[in-house]
Amino acid sequence: MDSNQPSPIVTLIVFILLVVGIIVAGVFVFLSRPEPAVITINPPEPTATSVPTSTPEPIAVYVTGAVNQAQTTVIVPFDSRVRDVIEQVGGFTEDANLDLVNLAGIVRDGDQIHVPSLSPNENIADNALPTPSGGDVIYINTATIEELQTLPGIGEATAQAIIDYRTENGAFTSLDDLDEVSGIGEATLETLEPLISFD
């Protein structure tokens, strides 16, 4: 046997050491890998969606008297005023008695607007108002939600708030009490004052 040839035992030991070295190197490489980055996706917070408010239906108003299209029923938006209705019927005639017309009056569904003429034959009752100033008085402490919604600036949500407030706190006695209701501001109170009663 050639003495320069390595013995099988030495060859085996070298092979084992080589394998062990490869394994150790592999473990070292595996353990030295950087930690994978963790990506966290945070969805945006849900935003509150406001409750849609109901849009009042258009109203019908009947017009008579000294206008260009007398005895006409017109359809106008909710909370329209007398001047808006007069425009729909072509305006006043030349003999219209404008001193007796409240152009700023707020009309309600089913109102009749009568424009008197300057003719001495026109029969107008004493203290009669030929054009409306807001319809019938609403009794704020007994009115239904539908009746409350006929008031200018009062939608379904505010009408319900009025009913809830009087249920929890008792009858309204003044405009100051009504001012406590959410959704009613100073401008609305001024508009409502001649149109409501606390009886």
Image (spheres, rainbow, N blue to C red):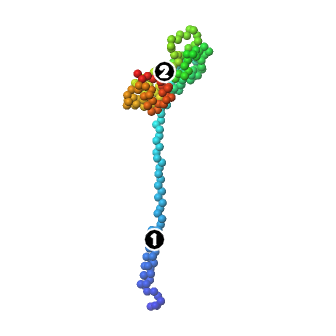
Residue found at x 47% / y 62%: 36
In this picture, residue 129 sits left or right of residue 177: right
Q: Answer whether residue 57 is visible to the viewer in this image.
A: no
Q: Which residue in the protein does label 1 denote?
A: 28
Residue found at x 49% / y 26%: 190
Residue found at x 47% / y 58%: 38
Residue found at x 53% / y 18%: 131
Picture quadrant of residue 170 = top left
Q: Answer whether residue 198 is visible to the viewer in this image.
A: yes
Q: Nearer the viewer, residue 11 or 125?
A: 125
103 to 34, vertically: above or below: above
Task: Identify the mark nearer the N-term, 2 or 1.
Answer: 1
Q: At which x and y percent is residue 31? A: 45, 68
In this picture, residue 100 sits left or right of residue 32: right
Q: Mark 1 belongs to which amino acid?
A: Phe
Q: Mark 2 belongs to which amino acid?
A: Gly
Q: Which residue in the protein does label 2 denote?
A: 135
Q: At which x and y percent is residue 98? A: 58, 16
State the mark number for residue 106.
Answer: none
Picture quadrant of residue 65 = top right
